[in-house]
Amino acid sequence: MKMTKHDSIPDLIGTCLGSIEENHSGSSIIYTSQLDRLSSSDIPYLFKKPKNIVTTTSQAPKIVAVSHVGGKEQVDSEWHTIKAVFHDFADLPHNRGELLESSTMECHGHVWTVRLYPGGHSGSTDDDQVAIFLHCVSATDMVKVKAGFRIRIPSSGKNYPSGKKLVFGRGEKRGWKDFAKRSEVLNDQSRFLGDGNLTVEVDIQVAQDKLPTWKPSIDVAPAWMKLLDSATSETADVSFLVGGEGKEREIHVHSIVLKVHAPDLAALAEEYNKGTPIPLTDFDPNVFRRLLRFVYGGEIPEKEFLRDNARALISASNRFGITGLKLVAEAELASAGINVENAAELILFADGTHCAMLKEAGMNFFMANSEAVMGSAGYADLKESPDILNELMVALVGSKKRSAHSGPDNRDYKSMCVSTLRQKLDGKGLDVDGSKEMLISRLEEADSDTTY
């Protein structure tokens, strides 16, 4: 309720302040039932008491575009953990400067090791120190890795954060020359050691270039998903036998739904006699079930399932023409990170499934890190595709540049990124699936139809 001229601001403020309570974190909260009595122009009195207060109820203008100059916009990955166990710590060589290094471990597409100096690093302050460093083995002069990390000793509960993201280049390690006193590590009361072993866990978060992605807007229809969940041999007229031998699962569906939302699946069903289960031995039952939930009700799988099964979802969606789910899974796979080890493999996969945005992202990474990618295991397979190899070479030599202007009147489609092309196609009500060449062709054809 808004204040009236008869209300006293100090009295009303006192009423509100009297309703402040401490929450579990120690911070103050005000119940909204009390704040309802204040108008937007009255609220400043809660925080300061100047004689003249100028307020405005207008909101800041909406930001409709962002430009990043001199670099790319980056996003943080999730935190993942690697662990190294140094057995019988007390018996390890501990002359100052002596190094022990863990085996290599992969995390976020990069290769890491944990380096331990049981008797201190050459740069440690004294001889009673233990030094620990994180080393990114896969970092090179061309492929630098920006990462934040926390070194943890689980037995003691001690946590050592890097504080900010640090850049790893070729041969560079990051950590602490004076991690802990050696005498403290050997002291049983400090609990650094468990059964005489020093266990080091390292949480790693890397900065990744944010990819330009576009996904279609999708309406969710829970009622239709209930229809799928309740389908049986008596209520549905089509069934699929999904999974390999010994893992088959029969899934019942309705042909009328397939005809409307999944014509390719409906066409497949018409090839079989009614009542005959349709075998789909190449698909995981859980993945196919998620595809059907999207077909029926537009449900997108939860992020964890999407991340773990992105390729399988893309393959199934591509085969049966479920474009919306395919584009969502493609965006998830691309945002999970493209690196030296997976770039060539992702380019091949994207080409085979017509994932234009993923292929574009992989090719851009290749152009920026060509020498390193050429040394990866996946590049041997990529070389077997003359067409893709030719595309990469043309891109490298031609140094194609995307147009900075992507307004409605700009028709330099070849210079645009895939996300922009898809947005334009969607705006025209055209198909957004297919290779970049197919997307460009559709736009050019649409332009020619409107040119007089």
Image (cartoon, helix red, strand yellow):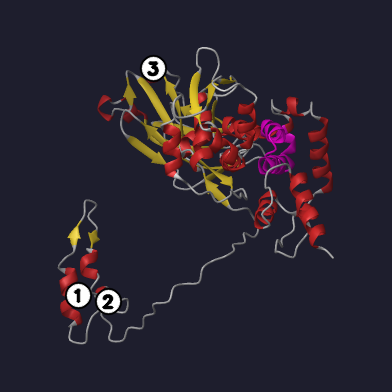
Q: How many marks?
A: 3
Callout in the foreground (2, 3): 2
The location of residue 182, given as percent across then percent down, is: 36, 29
Left or right side of 58 for 365: right
Residue at x-position 42% and y-position 22%: 85
What residue did someone put label 1 on? Answer: 13
Residue 48 is tagged as 2
Give how far apart the Cα atoms at labels 1 and 2 are. Answer: 11 Å
The one of 12 and 148 positioned closer to us in this rendering: 12
Q: Is disc 2 in contact with disc 3, using a CB cutoff of under 8 Å?
A: no
Give how far apart the Cα atoms at labels 2 and 3 are. Answer: 61 Å
The one of 104 and 212 positioned closer to us in this rendering: 212
Q: Is residue 66 above or below residue 327?
A: below
Q: Amino acid at mark 2?
A: Lys
**Mark 2 or mark 3: which comes first in sequence?**
2
Which quadrant would residue 200 be assigned to in this image? Answer: top left
> Dot 3 surroundings within 10 Å: few (below 14), some, or many (20 or more)?
few
Give how far apart the Cα atoms at labels 3 and 1 are. Answer: 65 Å
Residue 88 is tagged as 3
Q: Is residue 45 above or below residue 171?
A: below
